Each structure stands twice: as structure tokens, then as C-alpha cells.
Amino acid sequence: MSTIRVASRTSALAMTQTNFVIGKLRELSPQTDFEVVPVLTKGDQILDVTLSKVGGKGLFVSEIEATLVRGQADFAVHSLKDVPAELADGLTLTAFPSRADARDALITKDGEGLQSLAPGAKVGTSSLRRVAQLRRARPDLDIQSIRGNIDTRLRKLQEGQFDAIVLAAAGLERMGWQDRITEYLEPVTCLPAVGQGILGIESRQDDAALIELLSRFNDPNTELAAIAERTLLFSLNGSCQVPIAGYALVFEDNRNIWLRGMVADPDGTRVLQAEDKGSDAETVGLRVAARLRDLGADELLTQVSQ
Ligand SMILES: NCc1[nH]cc(CCC(=O)O)c1CC(=O)O
């Protein structure tokens, strides 16, 4: 049996996620060999500049995609949140394992919650989506950019460079670091990013045998949430220069999909939210996008931040 090669970023979280999926696939297919192909992406190399200024989140994904297109690896495990609305030609998202916690998590140095942080406390996040929503919840906070992998960010907090940071709960849980979380931020306070907490497995469209294996690991409800949220993102044509959020819940009993979307301006003074529900994930995504447009989202979406 030949070896299946898995392209992965080399950050601790990426490696943990990749090895988690490989472990599950070994259970499904014990006779198959898997080999990790490490890929150093631009997003991992450029650590001193805010990502939206150097070309956005796609930086973590495009080199991995190129490795798949060139046939140097067979599939990749992404944090779906980092995957742009459009994939490279010839590639497809093949499977979505069960979603982890989609919420953002606040980690404070001295154990305060969001409302009990001291006035003017210094909070580290570079996500425009988090900045806009934190400003709305606590306009007095001193929100500063922070970069680096989650291990680096936790270290910067520990060293006292920040009073608090905000990270995705899912990444912390996958690393086994959930005890660092001081407070889970509920979606009403901080609507999660499209795809947050979901792993997306990407492979070549024409690799039928591999797609058959990977799809056994697909969670149908997670897939529906991913489709609803990503249709919203695609339909808003969102770049990461505008704060956008989207969060879907799938109700098991009747396969009803509920989706809320948010578009804001970067300082959080204008925050537009809309929601809808229905039985077809794509339709729900399109309708929430249309409602946000009706509320004036286009004006925010065309703003180019400095
Ligand atoms: N952009 C970085 C990134 N991409 C995915 C995750 C966490 C895991 C997830 O959301 O699935 C993180 C770190 C963070 O936001 O704290």
C-alpha cells in the first residue's frame, strides 16, 4: 500500500490538528501509511506585521494548496477559519470532522472577566472582528495588536506585555490548554469567525480513492454549518480587512440551520447583524448576506483599512 502524504504547517497547533486527523484515519484504514510533509508558509515567516497588511489569512493556506496542486502532498488539514472563500483550482474541501467549541475565549493575567477588567486594561488581539466586538462591549479597553502562534501569545500574556488576550477556545482545547481560559465569550458578545472551531480537510478533486477514505470522517452537521457560514463569507466577498463574523447552529431533530452574520467597521461604532434559518445551508447563507446588504453592509465592506 502506498503512502499518503499530508501537508502541514509546522506550528504546534497545526501539527496537533494534522496528527489528530492522521490518528483517526489510521483507525479507519490500518493498512495505510501516512507521512507529514512540513510546509513553512509566509504567514508563519512574517511575524512582526498585522496579517491584514501583508495580504491576509490566505497566507497560511496558499502554499499548502500549491503543495497539493503540484502533487507533493495528497491532503491537508486546515483550521477552516484560515481558509479563504475561494479554493485553488482543482482542490476541494473533502471532509469536516465534528466541530469543537466555536467560541472565543478571554485569557486574563489576573483572572478577571471581560466586565471586571480594570478600565483601560491592555488587551492583545489582531483580529478586526474581535477588536470591533470588544470595543462595543468595553469601549475603554486599550486594544493592541499581537502576533505569533498561540503558544507565543500566551507567553506574551504571561510576561506581562498584556493584561488579557483573546484566542479561539478550539485551539486551546486541541492543545490541552483549556485551563488557561478565564471566560468563554458568548456569541451574543463576540460572534465567532466563519469556520472557527472547524477543521477542513482539503484534497485534489480527482483523487477519488482518497476522497472516499476522508469522507468517512465527515460530520454532516459540521459540514452544514461550514457551508452556511462560508456561503455568507463568499457572498459578502469579505476580505480580512473588514470585521466579518458568521456562526451557524444545526438542530439535529429537524436539520434546521440557524445562521447569524455580522459586519462591522473596524472601530466597532457600526455593527450590523442579521440572522435567518432554514433547511438548506447555502440558501440560509445567501439570505443572511442579503439581509446584511439591506442593512447597509456594502458601505462597510468597501472600506479599505490602512
Ligand atoms: N488565525 C489563527 C487561528 N486559526 C485557527 C485558530 C484556532 C482554531 C480554530 O478556530 O479552529 C487560530 C488561533 C486563534 O484564533 O486563537
Image (cartoon, rainbow, N blue to C red):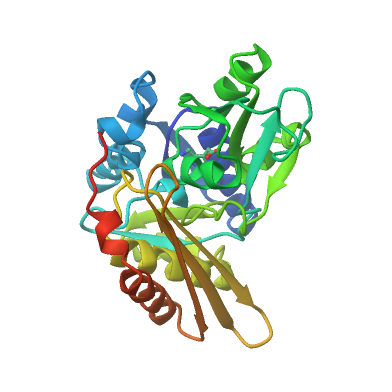
Q: Which residue occupies 61% across, 61% down?
A: 98
Which residue reaches farthest top?
A: 159
From this view, report whether residue 274 is shown above or below residue 10. Answer: below
Q: Tell which of 277 and 3 is nearer to you.
A: 277
At which x and y percent is residue 193? 49, 52
Q: Nearer the viewer, residue 253 or 267?
A: 267
The quarter of the displayed image where residue 256 is located: bottom right
- Residue at left 31%, top 57%? 85
> Percent position (x, y) of residue 233?
36, 61
Q: Is residue 234 left or right of residue 79?
A: left
**Residue 76 in picture, x, y percent from top left:** 42, 46
Using residue 17 as the reference point, say whether residue 83 is left or right of it: left
Number of disc labels: 0
Instruction: Say whether residue 206 is visible.
Output: no
- 45 shown above or below 58: above
Q: Quadrant of the C terminus?
A: top left
Image position of 40 with respect to 232: above or below: above
4 lies above or below 48 = below
Q: Is residue 145 visible?
A: yes
Residue in the foreground of this view, choosing between 210 and 110: 110
Q: Residue 13: x percent and y percent?
A: 56, 34
